[in-house]
Structure formats: structure tokens, C-alpha cells
């Protein structure tokens, strides 16, 4: 083996190492994959769906109403929909969503029982907290059970289903 072959080998190996480092950094800091477990996001997402989670987006902006997010709460990972934002008063009455007393369209709701933030011990969502609910409101472990979600618990935006492709 001459010096030219060694140089080519090192050049190729270095290229593969750079690609592996870039892929590793993307997976750790930019994207993640998460499998939906359970029926709480039906009919939007089904048990077994695999989501691509964008971890970077919320470093540049805050979550918006109706976005689907992934968050980690008490060592458990959830995928839910953002319903209430910091500073808002949220009430469901007769299946209708009211944000700060104004009726707001919520096409994801199948909520049957009335709900207000007072059941969580507050009238207004505090700064850096969010109210999240599953789309299958009658069968979802969400803010109604686990409380408001801190901004620090949010992993990213689960905006792309990669399996199944339909």
C-alpha cells in the first residue's frame, strides 16, 4: 500500500465520519421520531402512527393553538394538541370552546363534559404554560388529568406523519 492509497482511504473515512456526525446532530437536536401509542389522538392520528417531530421550530417561535406537539411529562412522552396559550382563559361549555369568553371554532372537539381552568386551580393559563388535549377528548390523558404543560416540557412540533403514508 503506497502513500496515495493511504491518503485516499483517510479522505474517504473522514467523509463518512463527517456524514455520521451530521446525522447524529440532526437526530439529537433537530428531529425525532415518535410512535403514537393509544387512541387519544383519534381520528387525526391512530395508534401505531409514526411521527416526525421537529425539535428546532420552538427555539424560534412559541407553539400556536391547534398545533400537535410532543412533550415529556413525568418521564412519559405524549403527543397532544395545543388548545390554550399563556394568558388565556379556556372554558368548554356544552361542547363549545370559549377563549377569553369568545366562542372559538374547535373542529377537533368531541368533548361532552363542561371544562374550565378553575378545575386546574387557576382562571388564566400562566406564562410559559399550555393547555393540551387529545383529539379523542373522551379517551385522552391530557391537561385535564395531568395539568398544564410547561414550555420546558415541550420537545417539538409533531407535524409530519411518516407512517403510514396515507
Image (cartoon, rainbow, N blue to C red):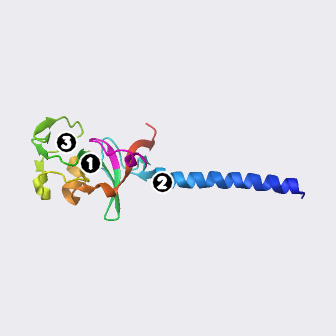
Q: Position of residue 62 (x, y in %)?
A: 32, 46
Residue corresponding to mark 2: 29
Q: Of circles 2 and 1, which is in front?
A: 2
Report the residue at 12% width, 45% height from top. Answer: 91
Report helix, strand or loop for mark 3.
loop
Residue corresponding to mark 3: 110
Foreground residue among 108 and 26: 26
Report helix, strand or loop for mark 1.
loop
In the displayed structure, would residue 8 be above or below residue 103?
below
- How many marks on residues? 3
Foreground residue among 152 and 116: 152
Mark nearer the N terminus (2 vs 1): 2
Residue corresponding to mark 1: 134
Q: Position of residue 121 (x, y in %)?
A: 12, 59
Q: Which residues are magenta?
A: 56-69
Q: Position of residue 140 (x, y in %)?
A: 25, 52
Amino acid at each position: 500500500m503506497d502513500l496515495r492509497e493511504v491518503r485516499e482511504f483517510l479522505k474517504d473515512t473522514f467523509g463518512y465520519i463527517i456524514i455520521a456526525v451530521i446525522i447524529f446532530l440532526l437526530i439529537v437536536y433537530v428531529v425525532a421520531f415518535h410512535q403514537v401509542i393509544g387512541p387519544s389522538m383519534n381520528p387525526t392520528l391512530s395508534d401505531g402512527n409514526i411521527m416526525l417531530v421537529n425539535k428546532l421550530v420552538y427555539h424560534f417561535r412559541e407553539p400556536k393553538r391547534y398545533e400537535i406537539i410532543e412533550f415529556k411529562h413525568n418521564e412519559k412522552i405524549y403527543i397532544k394538541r395545543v388548545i390554550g396559550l399563556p394568558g388565556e382563559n379556556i372554558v368548554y361549555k356544552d361542547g363549545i370552546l370559549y377563549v377569553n369568553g369568545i366562542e372559538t371554532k374547535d373542529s377537533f372537539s368531541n368533548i361532552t363534559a363542561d371544562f374550565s381552568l378553575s378545575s386546574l386551580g387557576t382562571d388564566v393559563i400562566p406564562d410559559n404554560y399550555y393547555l393540551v388535549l387529545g383529539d379523542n377528548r373522551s379517551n385522552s390523558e391530557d391537561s385535564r388529568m395531568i395539568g398544564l404543560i410547561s414550555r420546558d416540557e415541550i420537545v417539538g412540533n409533531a407535524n409530519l406523519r411518516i407512517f403510514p403514508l396515507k
